[in-house]
Amino acid sequence: MRTLAGVRRRGSDVWYAASLAAALPSVPTPATVPPLLSALLASSGSRERELLGTALLEVLNSAFALQPCALTVADRPQVHSQDDQGRLARATYGYYRCRVPQSGPPQRCAIRVYHRTAVRGQVVSASAFTNTLLHEWVHHYDFAGLGLRRSPHTAGFFARLRQLRSLVLPDLDPESTGPHPGR
């Protein structure tokens, strides 16, 4: 199996297959999620989003029995690259990082979400921020909940993201995965 960067390393097919097959367990929507999401979707300040996002992560981690995950909202433009004509070619909305020891749960789990758009430096929309936060939390679930050592963007990953979105945002289109479905 090949990736854009070349041939997959030995053993990564195991993580790919595990990611493809896994689903989120069914849990009831925690009562604190709707007011948190309403506030998050109405927010525009980086500090406010960091506080609300951290609270949402704590609720999700508790509901799915996961270890904590720190959140940083970087009040700076998204990391990006441009093509030869100066057009936006790629932008990073956010990312998840953790240290994965040889055995045991991941350590130093953290999500970083960029608060400003790549080129114009405008504040990202609340929905794009929320979608990015949920996307990165699914990576946290893959490492801390499923015990994967990699979290590839498989069909299973996006199915888990849709499951999460239907849990926390039940009124939205269940097929949507956010502003960056092909990430």
Image: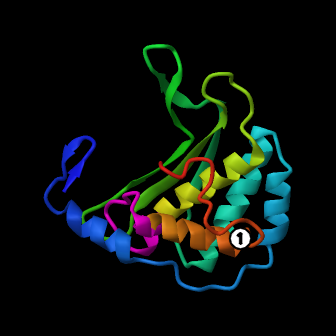
Q: Is residue 50 left or right of residue 31?
A: left
Which residue corresponds to the image point at 74% horizontal and 33% vertical from the top-left? 123
Q: Which amino acid type is marked by label 1?
A: Val
In this rendering, the answer to whether 75 lies above or below 23 is: above
Locate the N terminus by quadrant.
bottom left
Q: Which residues are magenta?
A: 140-156
Could one spot residue 180 in this view of the protein? yes
- Nearer the observer, 79 or 175: 175
In this rendering, the answer to whether 49 lies above or below 123 is: below
- Nearer the observer, 140 or 178: 178
Q: Is residue 99 left or right of residue 132?
A: left
On the image, the x and y values in percent for residue 121 come to 69, 24
The reply to whether the magenta stretch includes residue 150 is yes
Secondary structure found at label 1: helix
Q: Is residue 66 left or right of residue 147?
A: right
In this rendering, the answer to whether 121 lies above or below 103 is: above
Q: Residue furthest top?
A: 85
Check the image and tell me how it is coloured: rainbow
Location of residue 78 by image quarter: top right
Q: Residue furthest left?
A: 10
Which residue corresponds to the image point at 54% horizontal and 52% vertical from the top-left? 181
On the image, the x and y values in percent for residue 110 come to 52, 52
In this rendering, the answer to whether 55 lies above or below 8 is: below
The reply to whether the magenta stretch includes residue 113 is no
Could one spot residue 103 in this view of the protein? no
Crowd tier of the residue under label 1, counting other residues whose Cα lies within 10 Å: few below 14, some 14–19, many 20 or above: many
Please give the residue where the numbered disc 1 appears in the rendered image: 168
